[in-house]
Image: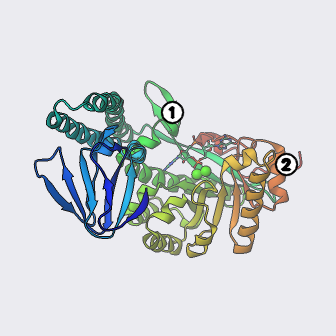
Amino acid sequence: MHRIEIKKGDLVLADQDNATCAYIVEAGKIAIDDRASSTPTYSVGPGEMFGEYGIIGDAVHYSTAKALEDSILMVVTQEEIEEKSEQADPMVHLFLNFFMDRCHSLTVRSLGSDDQVQHFTSRRKHWQNNIQTIQEQLLEQFKLKDELERALANEEFVLHFQPIISLRGGFTAGFEALIRWQHPDRGLLSPFFFIDTAENTGMINAIGQWVFKESCRFSRIFNEKAANSRSPEIFISVNISARQFEEDDMVENFKASLEETGADPAKIQLEITESVLMTDTDRAQKMLYELKSMGFQIVLDDFGTGYSSLSYLHKFPIDKLKIDRSFTHSMLDDQDSQEIVRAIAGLSHNMDIEVVAEGIETMEQLSMYRDLDCHYGQGFLIAKPLPVDEVYGILGTRMKLNG
Ligand code: C2E
Ligand code: CA
Ligand code: CA
């Protein structure tokens, strides 16, 4: 989207001009003479749109638009709308296409035998083919949503726990709780198959609550076992989706789970992503300070992949940063990645934030993080996410860090 300024009396578009964009009036007034409309001439002002044929079809304009005053216009291209529509919720995408189709058929009818109609129609064909795919996706999503509801009711979800070790002493410091779906027909499913749908349909709220409560329960069990074997206390790190933060009762639900399970919030970490901080900054700040005052530790997950603006960090009570595993993967071969990792490590030390390195698969990667004085490490080299009965054997163990 870009802006243009036009002077009073200037022509913005002429009948039969190629149509590849639409215009939104930001300031000023535009007179429209529209061949496809029953009103011969009308004017549009701030917030209104014209030239929308530029978006519904790859054709020509059927109107003339002229500035009645000096005006500022926002120009929206066909590609931009298509891209945004594809990224939207499938339901919104479907509705948008439905109305575009309606609009298209009305236009074709009103233009009758226009030479351009043929071209216009062939372009809509492409959209209609897409619609079938969207409809299928939408149906698939509805089906999966029902299945997720059933899975939750039937207790088909399980948590696996991936150890997080201290890169200083090698001992197991905590575990990240990662959800799996024990599907009755398809076996154990990774979140890859269902987390996006859970997010898109809002099911993530109920699932997230279950994950949180279950994590509280295991935090207590693991810590009791650790205490019995005189091992250091351990934390459980729980992934909290950005959508959960939109719910007004999230904090209350957390409180209720803590009470029911008797878990100690000081031994629970909440993993959030940068999108939580960027969506509604004031609200996020308030909620995070509240969670912090309850005793939780806050971890910023997938760090470096999102907005990656370090300047906002001081506004939030962040205890740990998790360097995204894509950096771990590339830092030994790619100078840019290595520089980013060094910068994150340096910055965290200055801000008194601890660093967790994710996705460690080789001893070289582990050594590099140790050289950078990062605090914690997690990855397949240390251990894969484990079912709960394998966790007990790991409590109190120490990994040899020098090859
Ligand atoms: P994440 O939060 O980044 O979790 C870490 C993912 O990296 C896990 O995938 C883990 O198995 C994988 N991983 C760990 N070490 C290595 C390694 O050395 N190499 C590689 N290549 N991968 C490694 P998983 O369990 O499949 O989870 C995928 C994502 O699903 C998670 O990414 C998280 O975003 C989401 N997720 C999982 N459980 C939950 C949950 O309970 N709630 C929410 N909201 N999201 C969850
Ligand atoms: Ca995580
Ligand atoms: Ca991560």
Q: In the current view of this chain or complex, which residue is farthest to the left? A: 38
Q: Is residue 66 left or right of residue 380?
A: left
Can residue 272 be seen?
no
Q: Is residue 78 above or below residue 342?
A: above
The kind of residue on which mark 2 rests is: Lys
Residue shown at 46%/42% (left/top)?
195
Q: Is residue 317 left or right of residue 38?
A: right
- Please name the residue that numbered disc 2 is placed on: 400
- Where 263 sits versus 364, above or below? below
Element type at marker 1?
strand
Q: Which residue is found at the position 85% from the left and 48% from the top?
A: 400
Please give left or right for residue 259 compared with residue 353 in the image: left
Q: Can you name the residue that lies furthest to the top here?
A: 185
Residue 364 at x, y percent in the picture: 84, 46
Q: Counting other residues with Cα less than 10 Å from the Cα at mark 1, is it few (<14), some (14-19), or many (20 or more)?
A: some
The residue tagged 1 is 189
Can you say which quadrant of the picture contains the N terminus? bottom left
- In the image, what residue occupies the spot 61% across and 65% down? 309
Q: Residue furthest front?
A: 9
